[in-house]
Amino acid sequence: MMYLMITQATAAWLLRQANHREAIARQLGELSAFESLKRTILTIGALRAAASPDGRVLALWNVDYISNTGEELWGGIKLEGRFGLLAHGDVVKEVFERELYIVNQRLQRLLLDERLIHRARDGGLHTCIAGRGAEAREHRLVYFEGDVLLGSTESKTVICFGPAWEDDSFLAAVRKETADLGAIVRTANSLLNDAGGRPVAETGLFGDLTERFPSNSTQVVTAETPVEDLPELSEAQASSLGAYQTADWTYEQWLATSSPLTAAQRRIVESSAIDVQPIRIVGAAGSGKTLLMMLLAIRRLYLAREQKAPLRVLYVAHNAAMQNAAYLRFIALGASEFMDDGMQKLEVKSLIELSREMLGSEDAPVIHSDAHETKTFQLQQVRESLAELLAGLRSPPESAVFARAKNDENFALLLSSFIADEIAIAIKGHGLTADRKRYVESERRLSRFHGLLDQEERGLVFECFVRYHKAIFEVLEVFDADDLALSLLARLHTPIWEMRRKKLGFDHVFVDETQLFNENERKLFPLLTKGKGDHVSVVLALDEAQQTRGAVSAGLGLLGFQGIADEKLGTVHRCTGSILKLAFFVIQRTTDLFGPDFPDFTGQTVTVIPSEHPLAAHPRLVMSSEDSRNIGKFALKQVRLLRKQNVRQIGIVCHSEVYWAVLRQELSQAELPFVLLTQRGERVYAERPLVVLARPDSVGGQEFDAVVAVGLEQGVVPPRVDFNQGLYSALEQQAFREMYVSFTRARYRLVVVNSFGSAPTAVLQQAIRAGLMLPSSE
């Protein structure tokens, strides 16, 4: 009694993709009979399939068409039995298409085409013609619609049965099976949400799917060796490992056959994939995604110059510091001729700058012209609004979450981060700024965080938004980053822009560090192109593991990147193998944010930094003694020990606000070349010895000879949250990503520093037992 459950967005996608749809139809029998799916997950390109342990539900989805809420709209197809699709092998393809059509239409509450000869029956049943073609048209389908409870919200669903002759026995059988509709849908949703905890199915079956689902332009790049066994380096490669030694290389030097570009990087640069579909460049930290994007952009400009064709290329950076770094790097690569007005033009901009230009509001009052400063101020204002709200309550909040925030400043700061994202995506993104009732009482999840809150807590979040909005919009009279993004999004959805974009849009759009842009901002990028052809010419450099905020973005397919192709980089140019293995061990513990993609990704990644390097050492955890209770002084001691061992550049990453002030005080007073890093993308001179202090959200994009990570202690990172398991899980996922970012900044040494009497956070205890980290005391 197996049911195929499929999300509405995936059904809509398959209806547009005949080849993909037919490949699935041909292999439905093998999928339903594949016992391994009861405990594993099948991953083929963007396609995912998993079955429940009892074999009753087979869930199918496309990862690029999944929302950010944790709850999807599910439709079903009965596969087995007398009234199942697989009982009619001669018409599976035609009937499967018709059932996908029913699922897509009815989950959107749209009427069926009248040519289907729809008839409503008693008890919520409906019938229609089973499909196109003479054979299929002789049969009927029965589908049942209903509402089911997912968590605390109701969701519409539809289940299709048949094909079969329309008679009383058919209708009676369907009525009997619809009693378990809610359980079937909840099982499908749990399979999707728990996918990250399942191992990937290893099988040589499903050849049609394997052939069809990877993009035609994308070749699978398999590393020659696993991360444990490092490739031998040539003398030329070994001499070019330092970032500062290649910082001034030109495009021609990078494209020379003797350069350290990997085969995968060279293939992507020289391919024409961008002409047929959007591209997502995926790779671990240090795999060269940014460099590859720049080389690809320059190559398109060179080709246009040779053909004497006009070309406009946009390269989008997240903030002013990253924009400036990208601008200087393009000049070093030799692209300065394209950075002035001409037939071929390269524009390097931040999204805030671009938004103000396109809205014609360069002088409009915004919080700050730099995205980092704007979002930092937004977070601070949310924190102040939350504190003001909690202080003004007549009685203590019944919510354990907000009661904890009222008495714990560090927890309040973490909660403020979630609320800031909620304001941006769930409240502003859904147009609910003036509709408290719809936000608080919504039966549908508006975000994952929204789904974790009860109505009282949602009311407090909305009240926090009201105070924030009043401070920003009415008192300061400025716009925030999301106001600009949503205003531009509205402008780009008008007929005026649709007419003008063929002239004013960009031929190619490159987006660096896409994970730093929220869902409102990501929706803009497809609309900035000229819109020629049936695809958007956008290239994204993306590593979701480096998104250190708690918000989860919807799949790129839902945001306008139809048919996006993955190009994977499997070589890391920064970390030793032991550091890389530890970082991957941590990030593979994620569940709700990544699914099975990252384990595949990590398993195929190698590093070119040899473990035999004179500066290399195994990652270690150091616990201070009772005599060294000052964590700042103890961290400084570790820095001095590293400097004595000729480690030139050291990054100290503070994972908890509890220790920030004391670290800053001790390091700033020491006689060291000290740098305080406050935003991502700031330039750190790679050729100079220095000591850098940063938080996880600002250290991305940097690299150091050694990293000292502070604060990764049980109960501190993540903080204990016994009263809301969902919130604790979200904080834990965020902590995993912050550790991944922190650890992958290190070339040769990684030292985790914990205070006296503390225990390492759980994942590090597991890493120690696995031999990936060495414990030691002062």
Image (spheres, helix red, strand yellow):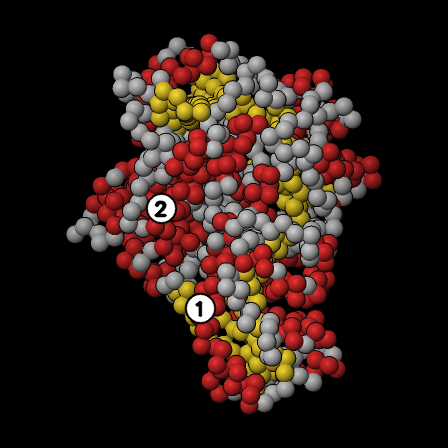
What's the mark number on residue 507? none
| Residue at which label 2 appears | 728
Above or below 758: residue 414: below
> In this rendering, does residue 422 appear at all?
yes
Q: In front here: 183 or 133?
A: 183
Q: How many marks?
A: 2
Quarter that holds the C terminus? top left
Residue 332 percent across, percent down from the top left = 67, 24
Helix, strand or loop under label 1: helix
Crowdedness near tag 1: few (<14), some (14–19) or many (≥20) residues, C-alpha within 10 Å = some
With 403 as the anchor, is 605 left or right in this view? Answer: right
Crowdedness near tag 2: few (<14), some (14–19) or many (≥20) residues, C-alpha within 10 Å = some
Residue at 47% across, 49% down: 592
**Disc 2 residue type (three-letter):** Tyr
Q: Looking at the rendering, which quadrant does residue 542 occupy?
A: top right
| Residue at which label 1 appears | 183
Q: In front here: 435 or 535?
A: 535
Which badge, 2 or 1, comes first in the chain's sequence?
1
Q: Residue furthest bottom?
A: 168
Residue 80 percent across, percent down from the top left = 60, 73
Q: In front here: 118 or 233?
A: 233
The residues tagged by marks 2 and 1 sit, at their Cα atoms, a distance apart of 26 Å
With 480 as the anchor, is 266 left or right in this view? Answer: right
**Disc 1 residue type (three-letter):** Ala
Residue 737 percent across, percent down from the top left = 47, 38
Quarter that holds the N terminus? bottom right
Residue at 69% across, 23% down: 232
> In this rendering, does residue 557 appear at all?
no
